[in-house]
Image: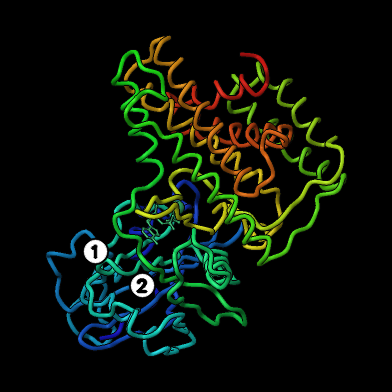
Amino acid sequence: MRVDTTEVSRVLRDWMAHQRWFAGKSRASTIEARLLATLADQPYLVQIWLADVSYAEGIEHYQVPLVMRAEAVEQLSHAFVGSVPDADGGPPIELYDALHDKEVTGLWLQAMVDESTVDGVSFVRAVDPEEIPVSQSSLALTSEQSNTSLVFGDDAILKVFRRLEAGLNPDIEIHAALGKLGGRHVAKLMGHVSAELDGQTWSLAMLQEFMTTASDGWQLATSSVRDLMAEADLHAEEAGGDFAAEAHRLGVSTAEVHADLATAFGATVLDKADLADRAAAMNARLTAALIEVPELAEVAAGLRAAYSEFADLPGQVLAQRVHGDLHLGQVLRTAHRWVILDFEGEPAKTISDRQAHDSPIRDVAGMLRSFDYAARHQLIDMGSTPQSEFRAAEWAERNRTAFCAGYAEGGGQDPQEAAALLRAFEADKAVYESVYEARNRPNWLPIPLASLHRLAGTS
Ligand SMILES: Nc1ncnc2c1ncn2[C@@H]1O[C@H](COP(=O)(O)OP(=O)(O)O)[C@@H](O)[C@H]1O
Ligand SMILES: [Mg+2]
């Protein structure tokens, strides 16, 4: 059995348009497939393909592992990619997303155990071979967003990067570095996969210890808010599911991770010129956002004042490697501790931008924005009353304060003392959110707008 590249390109064009991880849905593009590596030819042909997607503005590369079957498989219908002619003249070949085919996903782990290199794709192992759960079957997480993650039994999770870029993925880089320092708040790196391509190394996947029985921060926080709303006349500290002690611990853990990141990758300072550049970029983002979200006009002057204060900060601002996309959905509470996940940074940025040093207070701001969303989003469906608004605000404030206190206690810069930094970063993030909400979920727009009024001093 043999497939023609143009046929694979043809089916990928239709199929990718429906995949969550494909960022090019609303733009005109052409898709060219190319074969990267053949992992097996028996009993099924399993191959890693790349889809090169060209737009007027440039090119993106996506990873598409495929399994080729001689017959249609009912149980894999959700992972069906397309049917292509056999270039050897046999019956049509059925293509499926290999990551959803339990019969073949074990190949990734076996290759890691063997530390093999196949067609320039290297499988690197970071733990003893016995620790790799080769005999466990895999389950793809349904929450998939920008990548596809497979859980093997209760032991390991394989994150397969969909959108690829030359260079070591920061998620692998940071997990390796913090693991070496004995960091308690990250999952153990078990291995990774990379390809030699066009003279550079490209990260394809990462295998990690799977945190069993962990709950994610967003679920814990939002159920705390739900408990509070169900108890009509209690304050946040009196309700059953008070989150403040967890928020405090999460602050301590975040500070410890930041300290490890500074140890592993060094720290620098942002000088006057850096601050001015960043303030200019924030102002430019606000200017662009005003076109799409006219409601921002009421807060624009207050936000620009916050950005000026940021640009004029006296002294030097410490900078280092940061998480870059920290929010409650990126943290897990295990029985013992908080674990911070997903160090890829902001997906829209290039790898070198994501490796650039930034103030760790930007991560603090990201988490505080998330507390605000956790507090308020339920009011949108429930319909808010002045009382529920008040209580949501009280919940958010209580947990923000707890997180910041924990962060300072854990050795981070006290966010209270970095108020101007924090205000500018929160505002910049909330401006971004307002554009996102205006485009995708207009009924959520009041969440960032309310915060922007608070930050601008107009509420
Ligand atoms: N080590 C882990 N243990 C348990 N669950 C994990 C682990 N890593 C990731 N997850 C789960 O998978 C989800 C997606 O992982 P993440 O690294 O954030 O990828 P993405 O880039 O797709 O957001 C997380 O929100 C979490 O629920
Ligand atoms: Mg994530």
Residue 199, percent from left and from top? 62, 82
Residue at 34%, 79% in the rendered image: 131
Q: Nearer the viewer, residue 201 or 45?
A: 201
User: In which quarter of the view is residue 105 placed?
Assistant: bottom left
Q: Nearer the viewer, residue 217 or 431?
A: 217
Q: Amino acid at mark 2?
A: Pro
Q: Name the residue that disc number 1 marks.
A: 80
Q: Are marks 1 and 2 in contact (CB under 8 Å)?
A: no
Disc 2: CA contacts within 10 A as few (<14), some (14-19) or many (>=20): many
- Name the quarter showing ligand 1: bottom left
Q: Secondary structure at mark 2?
A: strand
Residue at 64%, 31% in the rendered image: 427
Residue 3 in the image: above or below residue 55: below
Q: Is residue 245 left or right of residue 96?
A: right
Q: Secondary structure at mark 1?
A: strand
Residue at 61%, 20% in the rendered image: 454
**Callout in the foreground (1, 2):** 2
Residue at 19%, 84% in the rendered image: 90
Q: Amino acid at mark 1?
A: Phe
Q: CA distance from mark 1 to mark 2?
A: 12 Å
User: In which quarter of the view is residue 176 placed?
Assistant: bottom right
